[in-house]
Amino acid sequence: MGKAEKTALGEAAPTLCKKHAKEIKDNLGYGDDADDDPLLVEEPAVACPVCRGVGAGEGMASGSGLERMPMPSPGLDVTPVAPWPCGPQAPLMDHSPEAGMQPILVTGAAGSVGAVGRTVVQGLRRRGLQVRALVRRDDDRAQALRATGAEVVVGDLTRARDVADALDGCGRMYFGMAVSAQYLLAAVTTAAVARAYGRLEAFVNMSQLTVSEMDATSGSESHQHRQQWLVEQVLDWSGLPVVQVRPTVFMENPLFQTVFSSIAKDGTIRWPFGKAKTSPIAAGDVAAVVEEILANPAGRIGRTYELTGPRSQDIAALATETSNALHRTVGYTDVPLQEWLDNDLGALGLPDHVLQHITTMARLHAAGRYDRQADGMADVTGRSAAGVADFVRKNPDLFTR
């Protein structure tokens, strides 16, 4: 490999002496073949940043330089990585608003169900903070994000190059993604790139409350639940400054769309839940928690915040609360699970992965697994989450034909 070529470190890769290049290669598991060499090697040793002790605390530890050298692991395709600065030229990170804090990266910023990412962008911009919004497509939703003053970048979370480009120069980030069969790939790719980047002071991850009830061998949850449990494990191992956010079911979830439709159609909640309880939360409240953590992460790194609505109640009580908000009677019909799956949920035409997830959520509801109460909302924002009646009053068109 010629010295002018790009390496796995991107442009301007460090030039190492043969001794330290071999130590780092051995540590990473690379062989001795020239084609396997990820580093530029030359003499004299005075050019080697490890020999000179350059970059301690800026992505390279003092001493051997092996502990924090930002190199990819063998077999992880993150080439080429963005040319992030390191060494004595790296800028000091002053995150005060007056000094112009580094941008906050928000993924899933144009999402649909609940639009948590979009709401987070809007909230951070209202605070005067710089935001970089990552979207899959440059469409009307992206234009709306630009109108808030956010920088919008287009990319795919399953592609390391796209993630590295989006993350470059950011100091904090939010990872959120819609229910998808590619969720695990996207999340692990993002974590791997963020770890190589090494400059985040906060990584806020959107998980699910069901994860708190799972372990390595539990099998009654959905494929999506399992992926999110695995992602939490990866993030725990990563050494990233992670904050986990675990909400219960959103009021905007397709599980509730079926209810809104049945209320609008015949004034009845049709669910196969019997006397089981639930405590749904509005996506806007979840976004408020994420926004506050991103704006003020100090003291929150390493913590997990579990979020629910203000009360856990059975469906009869939920129907009464809805009736009071609409000023008309709303009943509850307990229907057989399979009938509901075929006629109510099936009518939504959901993709297979999403359908399996929502079907599992319905089964877990019926089994009492969503009878939950948590105080994460108040812990972070200082206020309680909105209730079902608040949601109904805010969205009356959802409950009328």
Image: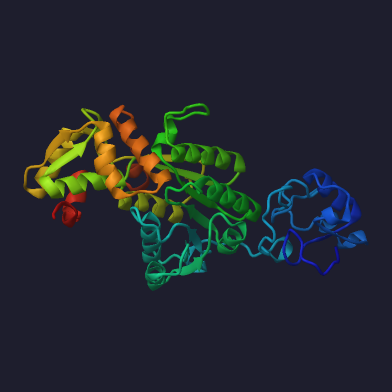
Q: How is the image coloured?
A: rainbow
Residue at (40, 35) in percent of width and height: 210
User: Above or below — where is 168 with respect to 218?
Assistant: below
Residue 15 picture location, percent across and down: 83, 61
State the residue at coordinates (82%, 48%): 25
Give the side of residue 246 with respect to residue 366, left or right. right
Observer-nearest residue: 312 or 301? 312
15 and 4: which is toward the camera? 4
* 174 lies left or right of 37: left
Q: Nearer the viewer, residue 163 or 100?
A: 163
Q: Quadrant of the C terminus?
A: bottom left
- Which quarter of the figure is the N terminus placed in? bottom right
- Residue 308 position within the rendered picture, expressed as x and y whole percent measured from the top left: 31, 40
- Visible residue check, residue 385: no
In the rendered image, residue 155, in percent from the top left (x then y), is placed at 53, 63
Looking at the image, is 132 positioned above or below residue 75? below
Q: Position of residue 317 (x, y in %)?
A: 16, 35
Q: Which image quadrant for residue 84?
A: bottom right
Q: Above or below — where is 249 with respect to 395?
A: above
Question: Picture quarter containing residue 166?
Answer: bottom right
Question: Residue at 85% of width from left, 47% of height from top?
Answer: 31
- Residue at the image position 10 percent from the left and 42 percent from the top: 330
Q: Is residue 256 in view?
A: yes
* Relative depth, front residue between 8 and 68: 8
Residue reaching furthest to the right: 44
* Number of numbered discs overlaid on the protein picture: 0
